[in-house]
């Protein structure tokens, strides 16, 4: 188990617990009661730590190396996942994954960013930063789902769309804008869920739907705290302040009306109990789909347009 800096009190207790178990095994002494005490201490300490998380600590949690990514959720929630590849134009972008899967007997199109579970795979997946062909692949799959009247679920987890020169040359901005335009008009139910990082146009490119949901320890904003700090203060040293000012957590997004709901995570984050998190996510998706299916397509599209048109607030002087 990997621990973040602010989880040091929990890590210390885990180390003591492991030593206790090791000494008990070596000496043959029954340490069951003491183990239970330590486990309770760990639970209490975790509750205390996670009750007072700062915005930037939640950002760090969203990037935890053990946190489940898109393919992990699909594997735990679904059966018979068939991954589909390529944008039929340039190539297959490994940072964007998608395909049909069976969710308790119902066929659903799942699409999402995939960061990679180790160093080599992160390089192959480009750290979850999709190129234009990734967004064009996502749109192709959405249109395929619409053709067969299957709902679409997108799982968003990206530090942003890939900002390289070659991506701009192939039309990164146009690809994201096209997706936004087309997703507004999709005639099938669309659920968008931020499962980790939700940065800028990289998130919006697969983030227009009937319901926008966020996991508790995810974030959603126009720029990462580090890049915001670099622009405003010419240094990464103010990233914590930037995170607070950006109001990027699920609580803030819910209060601003930019998301429709926040999905509770197991105490300690989704990575502490991925199976439980997958069950919670699956139940939420099924309930939301059941709700959306009761609304006819034209009304859903109209409500979708109204939802995004009414976002934000300003003072008119």
Image (spheres, rainbow, N blue to C red):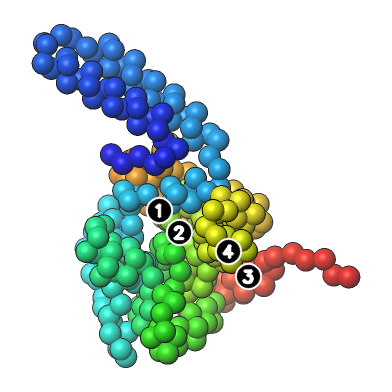
Q: Position of residue 291 (x, y in %)?
A: 51, 58
Q: Is residue 186 visible?
A: no
Q: Residue at x 27, y 52 (%)?
A: 76
Q: Secondary structure beneath disc 3?
A: helix
Which label belongs to residue 234? 4
Task: Using a 10 Å C-alpha cutoff, classify the residue at mark 2 as few (fewer than 14 neighbours), some (14 to 19) or many (20 or more).
Answer: many
Q: Nearer the viewer, mark 1 or mark 4?
A: 4
Spatial CA distance of label 1 from label 3 is: 27 Å
Residue at position x 22%, y 12% in the image: 31
Foreground: disc 3 or disc 4: 4
Give whichever of 170, 33 is nearer the camera: 170
Q: Which residue is mark 1?
A: 63
Question: Who comes first in sequence, dot 1 or dot 4?
Answer: 1
Across and down, in percent, residue 285 comes to 42, 56
Residue 174 vs residue 9, the one in the foreground: 9
Is residue 252 toward the left or the right of residue 26 in the image?
Answer: right
In the image, taking residue 316 as reference, residue 203 lies left or right, namely left
Image quarter in which the C terminus is found: bottom right
What is the distance, in whole Å, between disc 1 and disc 4 at their CAs? 23 Å
Q: CA distance from mark 2 to mark 3?
A: 20 Å
């Amino acid at each position: 188990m990997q621990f973040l800096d602010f989880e040091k009190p929990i890590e210390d207790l885990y180390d003591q617990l492991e030593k206790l178990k090791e000494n008990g095994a070596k000496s043959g002494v029954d340490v069951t009661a003491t183990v239970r005490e330590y486990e309770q201490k760990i639970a209490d300490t975790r509750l205390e730590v996670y009750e007072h998380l700062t915005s930037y600590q939640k950002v760090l949690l969203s990037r935890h190396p053990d946190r489940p990514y898109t393919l992990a959720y699909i594997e735990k929630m679904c059966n018979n996942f068939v991954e589909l590849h390529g944008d039929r134009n340039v190539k297959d972008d490994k940072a964007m994954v998608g395909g049909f899967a069976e969710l308790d007997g119902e066929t659903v199109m799942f699409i999402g960013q995939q960061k990679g579970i180790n160093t080599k795979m992160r390089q192959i997946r480009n750290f979850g930063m999709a190129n234009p062909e990734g967004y064009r692949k996502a749109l192709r799959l959405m249109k395929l789902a619409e053709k067969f009247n299957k709902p679409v679920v997108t799982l968003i987890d990206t530090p942003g769309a890939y900002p390289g020169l070659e991506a701009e040359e192939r039309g990164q901005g146009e690809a994201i804008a096209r997706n936004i335009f087309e997703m507004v008009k999709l005639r099938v139910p669309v659920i968008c869920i931020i499962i980790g990082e939700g940065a800028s146009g990289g998130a919006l490119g697969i983030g227009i739907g009937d319901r926008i949901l966020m996991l508790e320890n995810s974030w959603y904003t126009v720029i990462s705290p580090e890049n915001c700090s670099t622009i405003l203060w010419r240094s990464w040293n103010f990233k914590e302040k930037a995170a607070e000012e950006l109001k990027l957590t699920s609580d803030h997004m819910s209060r601003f009306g930019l998301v429709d709901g926040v999905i509770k995570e197991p105490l300690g984050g989704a990575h502490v109990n991925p199976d439980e998190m997958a069950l919670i996510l699956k139940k939420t998706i099924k309930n939301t789909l059941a709700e959306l299916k009761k609304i006819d397509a034209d009304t859903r599209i109209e409500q979708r347009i109204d939802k995004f048109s009414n976002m934000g607030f300003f003072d008119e002087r």
